[in-house]
Image (spheres, grey):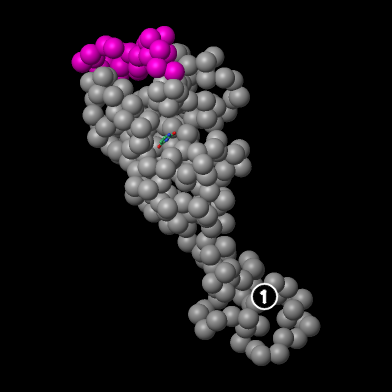
Amino acid sequence: MKDDLKTILTRHLELEAFYAGDFSIRGAPCTRSARTVPSAESDAMCPTARPQKSTPTSDIATLQAPPLDTLDAIAAVVRQCRLCRLSENRTHAVPGQGNPNAQLVFVGEGPGEDEDTQGLAFVGRAGKKLTDIITAMGLRREDVFICNVVKCRPPGNRDPRPDEALACLPYLKRQLELIEPKVIVALGAHAAQRLLETDQAIGRLRGRFFEYPYSNDHPPAKLMPTYHPSYLIRNYTVETRQRVWDDMQKVMGELKIKPTRGD
Ligand code: URA
């Protein structure tokens, strides 16, 4: 998991360095930049060498990915990320926010318009519904961590495409690895399917715990899929509300939290 993120960062840094003209291929240092007329011999040894700016050449091996050992470090990388097309139209990337030591993490699908404007997860209409759910569980938003599978808004709030979700997933996985929550609530099909690596429908997944393994020795988190707050808003029936509330009561049981109200 950490390796996925390293690969992403290294690719990112290579790309940045490439466009900044501060890049040469791995291997023996290439000296062609010091000369004005390249020879056939140096071309063969340095097939991709480009004219250099005055800055020193850096080798891939020496490019240092920043250590992603804090949520802030991940957030900083997410804000610079250009790994998929979603970055092209964003106002703000939305890394996620909340308690870095949370026992409970909510994972949604991706930012909407309000989230894109503010750079914060779940602050629009769906966010208000999520706040209601968190409050009904006897918690505050500051007690939990809230984030998404994709960190940039899909245009027109369309579903994230598989390549976009795959490009972004290592950020989420590393966030979960750092927080090590006891329970993860996957809000909606996208979050549940990505985290559980399944294509089963949310209606079949919701209501029971799955294991979400960490890559270290820590015991796995319990992952509860439930309906997305937007789905709840669109289908505000007694039945749907009851199902989400049932799911949250199971989460509360796992975390030993007492409810403040039970609608
Ligand atoms: N829907 C999501 O899935 N995430 C948000 O942050 C907002 C709406």
The residue that label 1 is drawn on is: 49
Q: Quadrant of residue 27?
A: bottom right
Q: Quadrant of the C terminus?
A: top left
- Give residue 23's position: percent from left, percent from top: 58, 71
Residue 246 is one of the magenta-drawn residues? yes
Residue 104 is one of the magenta-drawn residues? no
Q: Quadrant of ligand 1?
A: top left
Report if residue 29 is visible in the image.
yes
Residue type at tag 1: Ala
Residue at 48% over, 61% down: 64
In this view, which residue lies farthest toward the right? 40
Stretch in magenta: 235-263
Q: Seen in the image, is 218 located left or right of residue 41?
A: left
Residue at 40% over, 17% down: 236
Residue at 52% over, 15% down: 203
Q: Is residue 127 above or below residue 114?
A: above
Q: Is residue 173 above or below residue 238?
A: below
Q: Quadrant of residue 147?
A: top left
Q: Nearer the viewer, residue 109 or 16?
A: 109
Report if residue 94 is visible in the image.
no
- Give residue 174's position: percent from left, percent from top: 44, 41
Q: Seen in the image, is 125 located left or right of residue 195?
A: left
- Give residue 58's position: percent from left, percent from top: 54, 72
Pointer 1 residue Cβ closer than 8 Å to ligand 1: no
In this view, which residue lies farthest toward the left? 260
Q: Is residue 39 above or below residue 73?
A: below
- Secondary structure category for the residue under label 1: loop
Neighbor class of circle 1 (other Cα within 10 Å; few <14, some 14-19, many 20+) is some
- Give residue 221's position: percent from left, percent from top: 41, 25
